[in-house]
């Protein structure tokens, strides 16, 4: 299985995608609970193999000082926990149905230099990205994000 960034395999990804929904699937024993969240976000793939993703939890409070270097520890923590962003390059493995985001920069320093693998599905104008299961706080968690392609003006695909 060779990962590739050929025009053919990358073509469906190219463009700007707006986040429609995110589900968190938490496996507890034999049961899986699903939490749906309404977030705001964009993921962008370009023809040169670059990508960037940003997700924001709506309703984050502004810092009282208006200055990120003068916020209280609580304000800065809340701001950090309510935002996710990274950028890098991407490769597609059509046989595995996966896209790998090679992280070059991230709000979370732990991700820098690591590949973030996502399993993809294109359906009805959307791109669904599913993370592999990960152990978080002793539970198996999978995230499922649904993105809708936009035109260059951010008004939805036309």
Image (spheres, rainbow, N blue to C red):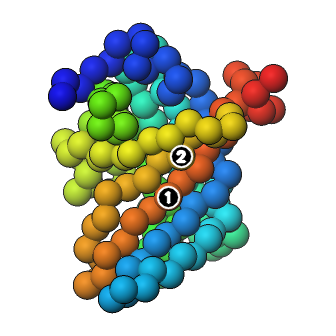
Residue drawn at 49 percent across, 17 percent down:
11
Relative to 30, say whether 65 is above or below. Answer: above
The furthest residue to the top: 7
Q: In this view of the protein, can residue 105 be seen by the observer?
A: no
Q: Are marks 1 and 2 in contact (CB under 8 Å)?
A: yes
Give residue 97's position: percent from left, percent from top: 36, 37
Work out whether 146 lies above or below 66: above
Write down the residue under mark 1: 144
Q: Give the distance between the C-alpha atoms of the residues marked 1 and 2, in whole angstroms.
A: 7 Å
Which image quarter holds the N terminus? top left
| Figure quadrant of residue 131 | bottom left
Identify the secondary structure beneath mark 2: strand
Determine which of the numbered discs, if any, sits on residue 39 in the image.
none
At a point 43% along the width and 85% down the height, the residue shown is: 31
Place of residue 102 in the rendered image (x, y in percent of width and height, measured from the top left)? 27, 36
Q: Is residue 154 left or right of residue 100?
A: right
Residue found at the far bottom of this picture = 29
Within 10 Å of the Cα at label 1, are there few (<14), some (14-19), or many (20+) other Cα atoms? many
Percent position of residue 81, x then y: 46, 69
Q: Which residue is denoted by mark 2 in the rendering? A: 128
Quick check: 112 above or below 138? Answer: above
Closer to us: 107 or 36: 36
Query: Disc 1 on helix, strand or loop?
Result: strand
Of 142 and 78, nearer the camera is: 142
Q: In the image, 99: left or right of 52?
A: left
Q: Is residue 12 above or below residue 61?
A: above
Q: Could you tell me if residue 69 is visible in this image? A: yes
Quadrant of the rendering where the C terminus is positioned: top right
First in sequence: mark 1 vs mark 2: 2
**Which residue is at a point 53% across and 54% down the rendered structure image?**
145
Estimate how packed mark 2 is, as few (under 14), some (14 to 19) or many (20 or more) residues with alpha carbons within 10 Å. Answer: many
Q: Residue at x 47, y 47 (%)?
A: 129
């Amino acid at each position: 299985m060779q990962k590739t960034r050929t025009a053919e395999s990358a073509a469906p990804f190219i463009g700007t995608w707006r986040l429609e929904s995110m589900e968190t699937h938490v496996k507890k024993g034999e049961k899986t609970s699903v939490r749906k969240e309404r977030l705001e976000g964009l993921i962008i793939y370009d023809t040169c193999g670059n990508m960037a993703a940003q997700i924001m939890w709506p309703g984050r409070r502004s810092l009282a000082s208006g200055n990120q270097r003068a916020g209280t520890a609580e304000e800065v923590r809340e701001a950090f926990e309510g935002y996710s962003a990274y950028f890098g390059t991407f490769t597609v493995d059509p046989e595995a149905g996966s896209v790998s985001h090679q992280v070059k920069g991230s709000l979370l320093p732990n991700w820098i230099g690591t590949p973030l693998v996502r399993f993809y599905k294109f359906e009805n104008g959307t791109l669904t990205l599913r993370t592999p299961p990960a152990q978080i706080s002793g539970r198996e968690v999978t995230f499922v994000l649904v993105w809708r392609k936009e035109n260059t003006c951010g008004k939805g695909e036309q």
